[in-house]
Amino acid sequence: MASQLAVLLILLLPLAGASTDDGFIRQVTDGRRSRAGAGALGLLPEAQFAAFVRRHGRRYSGPEEYARRLRVFAANLARAAAHQALDPTARHGVTPFSDLTREEFEARLTGVRAGAGGDVQRLVMSGAPAAPPASQEEVSRLPASFDWRDKGAVTGVKMQGACGSCWAFSTTGAVEGANFLATGKLLELSEQQLVDCDHTCSAVAQNECNNGCAGGLMTNAYAYLMKSGGLMEQRAYPYTGAPGPCRFDPAKAAVRVANFTAVPAGDEAQIRAALVRRGPLAVGLNAAFMQTYVGGVSCPLLCPRAWVNHGVLLVGYGARGFAALRLGYRPYWIIKNSWGERWGEQGYYRLCRGSNVCGVDSMVSAVAVAPVP
């Protein structure tokens, strides 16, 4: 078995390209896909690292720092190879964070500090009313595949930069979709308003508060928007990727939030129904395999579902994504990320659905908007 796995790994490694990353939820910076293709991965680590440094404009303090980062990079090549072996239906490779140690990456780029286990579900499900369930008849009539991008309900992929604001991007994506369903207009809404102005704490854990680039929760953000008077457009309150003084003007609110609901965990049929019925959904998941993800349908053989550390937007689902080690073709979720178009599949992530892979059904919420006076 070990020899077969080694052969499989050798065959799949050339498929890995370049990509990247994230995370009370938190961060990520730009991912740039390798243009060197499969051949680059046949180079020695020194040559790959030199290409990485040029591609991402790295500047180190001197030869010692360069050598240390080279050692880290080589160790991360092995980590990407391990991800490829554990997730062979996707493609994994070098990312803009390949010169960071795991500890550095986790400290800078992850962080639902609510912790593991049922804490995240308790925060979300106790802080929001449950969505009304879909009937069996409604579930049976759901389309085999569905994509809100095809309906015009999804804005372009955005870039959160070096700021742990994925929660804000997940929130605005859900509100943008809900506003489109209500008005027929697709507006780009302001993440920076949430970063600067939203310090809402969870109704069930007063120490779990939205904190700009240090992380947050989407349900906290909905509660803030209901109290504050709404959300401004991106062009009126542009994104800077760093916290600043609150400049929200209620008179310039473009969208107002009426209510929000949590989709009960553990029932992906109900999540599909809520997605079709309510528009794009804010979700949290474990981003462990996203750090090295380049493309394909990700079906990790081992991805702890209890540790949710990244906020994204669920925009659709598909019926047939190839997964060799998961009995052929498997259904998948279509997920919009906030790491720019050069990460993943033009900024999107496809993740197996049907068994709560990476905890994707543990933190799901929908929002509804109200007319702006």
Image (tube, grey):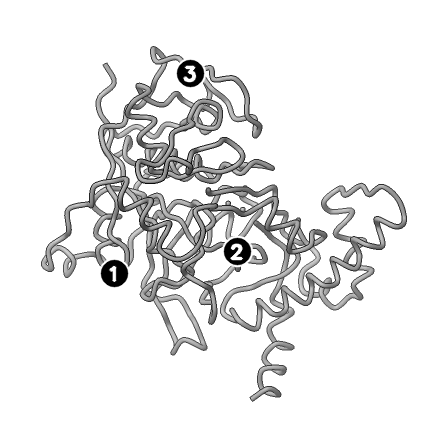
**Closer to us: mark 2 or mark 3?**
3
Res 170 quadrant in image:
top left
Looking at the rendered structure, the kind of residue marked 1 is Ala
Q: Which mark is residue 290?
A: 2
Q: Nearer the viewer, residue 126 or 58?
A: 126
Left-right relation of 208 to 43: left
Looking at the rendered structure, the kind of residue marked 2 is Met
Q: Give the residue furthest to the right.
A: 63
Marks 2 & 1, CB-CB < 8 Å contact: no
Look at the numbered disc 1 and give the secondary structure of its residue.
loop
Q: Answer few, some or many: residues within 10 Å of disc 1's Cα (few below 14, many 20 plus, some between 14 and 19).
A: few
Q: Which residue is mark 3?
A: 248
First of labels 2, 3 by sequence position: 3
Q: Answer few, some or many: residues within 10 Å of disc 3's Cα (few below 14, many 20 plus, some between 14 and 19).
A: many
Q: Residue 252: x and y, percent?
A: 36, 13
Q: Quadrant of the N terminus?
A: bottom right
